[in-house]
Image (cartoon, helix red, strand yellow):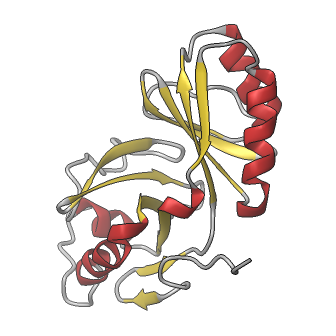
Amino acid sequence: MSNAVSALEKTSFEGFAKVSETGLRGMITLRGDLSSKPVKDAVIASTGAEVPDVRRMSRGSIGDVAWMSPDELLIVCDYRAANEVVTTLLAALDGAHALAVNVSDARAVFRIEGDGAREVLAKVAPVDLSTEGFQPDDFRRTRIAQVAAAFWMNSDDSFEVVCFRSVAQYVFDVLKVSAQEGGEVGFL
C-alpha cells in the first residue's frame, strides 16, 4: 500500500500574508435532506456538530460541518478518521435516503494567515470579505480566480480554502501572487 501525500506536500509562501498547504485532511460529502431527523442525528453522531445554518460551519469534537448547498454538507475531520466517520454516518443513516462519501484524496486545503489574509482572498474571490460581511465560521462555496473552491474563516482570523486536488498548484499560485509584498490594496 502506498503512503498518502497531500497535493503540494505542505508548501508555503510568505508575503504580506502567509499561504500554506495544510497537508492531508479528511473530507466527507454528505447529500440528503438536511432538515430531516435522520440526517441531523447522523451528523451529530459522527461529528459532534449540528447541521449548520446556510453558508456557515458548525464545530464538533470529531469534525467540523460546512453547509455546501440545500442538500449537501462537507464534513472536515482528521484524515485518518475519515473512513470511520463515513462508517458512523452510514450506520446512523440506515434506511434514510442519503449519500456519504470520503472525498479526502480528491481535495487540497490551504491556510491563509496574517493581517493581510482577508485581503488575499478578497482580491481573488467574488465574496464580501469586509469585517462586517465575513466572520469566523462563515463559509462560502465560490471560485478562486477561475476554479471552484470553498473557504471559511477560523476564530483566529485565518482562512482555509478547499479546492480539487487537480487544481491545487493553480490555486496555490493564485494565492501566492495575491499575497506578494507590494500587492496590498489596503482596502480591508
Q: Position of residue 11 (x, y in %)?
A: 49, 88
Q: Position of residue 27 (x, y in %)?
A: 60, 51
* 184 or 5, nearer to the observer: 5
Q: Is residue 42 visible?
A: yes
* 118 or 53, nearer to the observer: 53
- The answer to whether residue 127 is above or below residue 45 is below
Picture quarter with the C terminus: bottom left
Q: Position of residue 125 (x, y in %)?
A: 23, 56
Q: Position of residue 117 (x, y in %)?
A: 39, 69
Q: Is residue 137 left or right of residue 83?
A: left
Q: Is residue 159 visible?
A: no
- The answer to whether residue 98 is above or below residue 95 is below
Q: Is residue 66 left or right of residue 135?
A: right
Picture quarter with the N terminus: bottom right
Q: Is residue 84 left or right of residue 120?
A: right
Point 28% across, 75% down: residue: 170
* 12 or 130, nearer to the observer: 12
Point 47% across, 87% down: residue: 12
Point 60% across, 41% down: residue: 101
Q: Hey, which residue is sitting farthest top in the picture?
A: 36
Point 48% across, 61% down: residue: 107
